[in-house]
Image (spheres, rainbow, N blue to C red):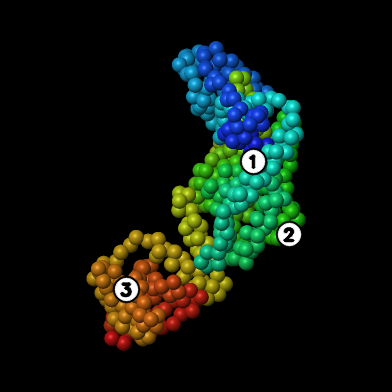
Amino acid sequence: MKNKWPGLFLLLLLQYLGIWCSRAQGPQAPREAQLQVTPAITRLVIDSLAQVLKLHYVFPDTAAKMAAWLDREYKKGAYAAIRDPRELADRLQRDLQKAHRDGHFHLNYAPGLAKDLADTTGAAERHRIGDSLGLAFARQRNFAFSKAEILPGNIGYVKFNGFVGFVKEALPTFAGAFRFVANTDALIIDMRDNGGGSPTMVCTVAGYFFPERHHWNDIISPGGKQVFYVDPADVDSLTLKMPVYILTSRHTFSGGEDFCYGMKALHRAVIIGDTTGGGAHPAGPVPVAMGFVADIPFARSLNPYTNTDWEGTGVYPDIPVSSTLALDRAKQAIFADWVQHATTGEEKMKGQWLLDDLTARKSQQTPAASSLATYCGTYEGGLVFYVDHGELYCKNAERGGDVFKLLPVSGDKFVLDENVHVVFEKDDKGAFQEIAMLWSDGRVSKKRRVR
């Protein structure tokens, strides 16, 4: 969760980057002279920042602590040699994070942005332009939605990297993606690169996963409390009932955490990956003296079920694992759950097949060549098993003579190809004379050794 007006925020960002300038009179508009910082200017900026924090920061006591920290550093001469305003902004930002870590607080030197924030003349027109630019920007990036696909085992996978503020315009993209995975048996939502966005969009997306309206979250500020609900009616009553697994990283932040936290609190998803970044306070830009701008958290979140939020702590995963391994760990959890809760032997075998396949393809084990030699021979249908350079291979006449390298699963079980696993079985004398072929659809067939 970030700003009240997504388009305005984009406009302000573009102004800061120098891409857009509402005050420019053409390509030859003069640039403002670079501010030369002096100790007196630094003192003025610190005093102004202290006042801004006092007026706007979500926790007044913390604001006073942050201001006092900067004051002590100034008196120690920590900023005396700084002359570049951007260097000053960076240093003050780092020191404020030492005083109190808040991932939503940022300080920048942005004189053009500071002027527009302070000047309400033409604000409505700037908002309109900002909304137009923001929508175009969001469309170019597919409203932060990057992938929807079906993984082996009929697992849905969707990835989106933000919650844009243009809910009406973005909804067809999200609806199309979620309808695409609506018939899967489990759904993985990849939030590892989701940095947040609109709390309204968070609730809208969450509406796909609940058959009834639910209280989701509150945002509390000095001006009052804003209550958020998830409602399936907001998404044309498309309800996804399959188990949900959400992937997280330390880069999952703000609105991304809002989604994870709410889904976890309502027991609707299993969170897998790293603990998230820990930013629960909505923020907005406020001008500071001498062209500096502070992005200040002005409110706090409050979950109605836990009576707290994820500020500073992040969302703890149900299954902690490095974010780089989270996708495979989610698949493993899904397959293991299918095995555990299978109601038929065929369902259990299908789940075990998928679990074994994943394990084998990620395993680094290499059986000794001497043990592999005991599997060598020709089996019915023209399956020829042999060892080459310490690896077990199969030449399959039934597939036109294609050669496959077998991957060990456990014991005498191996992955043969994309459809079949094989288990080498011994006779009464301890010799391998038969193979059981385990098919991905749960079937089992046998082939005898012919030589």
Q: CA distance from mark 2 to mark 3?
A: 51 Å
Label 1 sits on residue? 1
How far across and down, in percent of the image, does residue 154 sit? 55, 67
Label 3 sits on residue? 393
Residue 149: quadrant of the picture: bottom right
Q: Is residue 76 left or right of residue 404?
A: right
Q: Is residue 315 left or right of residue 380?
A: right
Which secondary structure, mark 3?
Answer: strand
How far across and down, in percent of the image, does residue 36 sit? 52, 17
Label 2 sits on residue? 237
Which secondary structure, mark 1?
Answer: loop
- Tag 1 or tag 3, which sits nearer the N-term? 1
Q: Is residue 274 left or right of residue 6?
A: left
Which kind of residue does numbered mark 3 sit on?
Answer: Tyr
Q: CA distance from mark 1 to mark 2?
A: 24 Å
Is the Cβ of the residue at disc 2 closer than 8 Å to that at disc 3? Answer: no
How far across and down, in percent of the image, does residue 319 sit? 51, 52
Front residue of 241/298: it is 298
- Tag 3 or tag 2, which sits nearer the N-term? 2
Which secondary structure, mark 2?
Answer: loop
Which kind of residue does numbered mark 1 sit on?
Answer: Met
Q: Within 10 Å of the Cα at label 2, are there few (<14), some (14-19), or many (20+) other Cα atoms?
A: some
Depicted 181 relative to depicted 250: above or below: below
Q: CA distance from mark 3 to mark 1?
A: 54 Å
Front residue of 342/403: it is 403
Depicted 315 relative to depicted 57: above or below: below
Is the Cβ of the residue at disc 1 closer than 8 Å to that at disc 2? Answer: no
Please tell me which residue is depicted at 70% across the width and 60% down the height of the picture.
238
Please tell me which residue is depicted at 47% across the width and 68% down the height of the picture.
354
